[in-house]
Amino acid sequence: MSETMTVDELLGRETTPAALALADGTVYRGRAFGAKTVKSGEVVFNTSLTGYQEIATDPSYAGQIVTMTYTQIGNVGVNGIDDESQKPFLSGFVVKELFDAPSNYRAEGDFDAKLAEAGIPGIAGIDTRALVRRIRDGGAQVGVLSTDPEVQGTDALVELARQAPGLDGVDWVANVTTPTKYDFDEGIWAGVDGQLPRPERPGQELKIVAYDFGVKKNILRLLVEQGFDVTVVPATTPASEALAMNPDGIFLSNGPGDPEAVEGVQPIVRELVQQKPVFGICLGHQILGLALGGKTRKLKFGHHGGNQPGKDLATGRVAICAENHGYAVEAESLRAAGEPVAITHVNLNDETVEGIAHETKPLFSVQYHPEASPGPHDAQYFFTRFREMVERSAAGESVTGAQICGTGDAA
């Protein structure tokens, strides 16, 4: 047997060539999976060891080509329960080794076919370590992924990458938000016999309106588990319409891309925060920061994965966090805006802002993903904090985000 035979050759599989070209001229070649097409996007890497299906169906990845640092992808297949949205919105998927014969009792299909059905291309068999080092050292850049056998020329692909738009200045939320409002009442997966029972939900049901900037289902599930009656609305729903539903609180969801490019939402949020308790996650956190007069900046290569350290400045505790963002709120800009906002959490890797809380209003937000999916559950307490803040506000108490987050005086 030749030592240079590939796994595909050993198994007698026919393969289609694929190529990933970066704007800096670097080209990686491997085998195609998913859809046969050509797509551009910002190339990022995700350090999660599990959860490729949740990552692929997270709308926050719209406009991005995701590279997994873990080498073996596809081994547990896919299923309907683990989808985080109705379909994948990302531009491409890059892996070292693709398993197309999954083995798991929950599997309903394979990852290759799921991406193909969604029109998303993938490339396998490249040196993902070299690609990650290039992004880490040089910063995120636009790439083009071609699984079309007729579009494989190096010069043409590199030129396409150089001409393709990135994330900056593009409103990607418009591509992923719901077109109409809907009610959501699905709780978390109950698991299998022998697992611990789910916690009992609070008895008093409270109404919240969730703004969909690219919301993940597990966020909505955990809001339901907190006893909320959840109505999801499009990203640009006027504040007057949301308030006419008489909610007890407002939630601002995660989502993709450049927060400053999301059209029309800052005035909406500025109006909402004057009247209702507000909690934001990820892009919702950034939009809340902008609405309070702050600014955001692009990170060199972003935070994408399930092993980021987030420190709670009030307690000193560090949570291992799931993160997916390429922009961050600038602490100095919040201070300069004159709003009484406390920085509640920071990322220990680079000291970027990961949580804020208002000192006079019932508002707080977090940059990372307390709902995980995938990732650790260390930060799920944020949903309990939101429930407490909304409950106390609905009872007529004067409560602030800083009090709820432990950075202000008790009420």
Image (cartoon, rainbow, N blue to C red):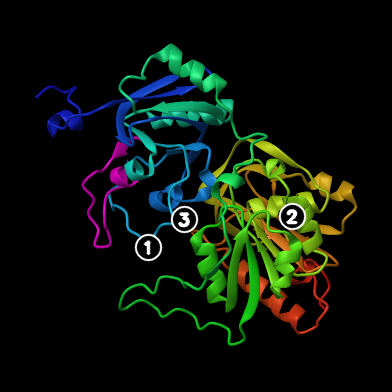
Task: For mark 2, give the secondary structure.
Answer: helix
Q: Earlier in the sequence, mark 2 or mark 1?
A: 1
**What is the crowding at mark 1: few (fewer than 14 residues within 10 Å), some, or many (at least 20)?**
few
Residue matched to label 1: 81
In the rendered image, the residue lying farthest to the left is 1
Q: Disc 3, disc 2: CB below 8 Å? A: no
| Residue type of the residue flagged with mark 1 | Ile
Percent from the top left, x then y, of residue 227? 57, 79
Percent from the top left, x then y, of residue 14? 17, 29
Q: Earlier in the sequence, mark 3 or mark 2?
A: 3
Question: Magenta includes 105?
Answer: yes
| Residue type of the residue flagged with mark 2 | Leu
* Above or below for 165 versus 309: above
Q: Which mark is residue 85?
A: 3
Percent from the top left, x then y, of residue 389? 72, 74
- Rounded to the nearest angstrom, the CA distance separating label 3 from label 1 is 10 Å
Identify the residue at horizontal 67%, vertical 36% (top origin). 298
* Residues in magenta, as a range: 94-114
Identify the residue at horizontal 27%, vertical 49% (top origin). 110
**What is the crowding at mark 3: few (fewer than 14 residues within 10 Å), some, or many (at least 20)?**
some
Q: Is residue 50 visible?
A: no
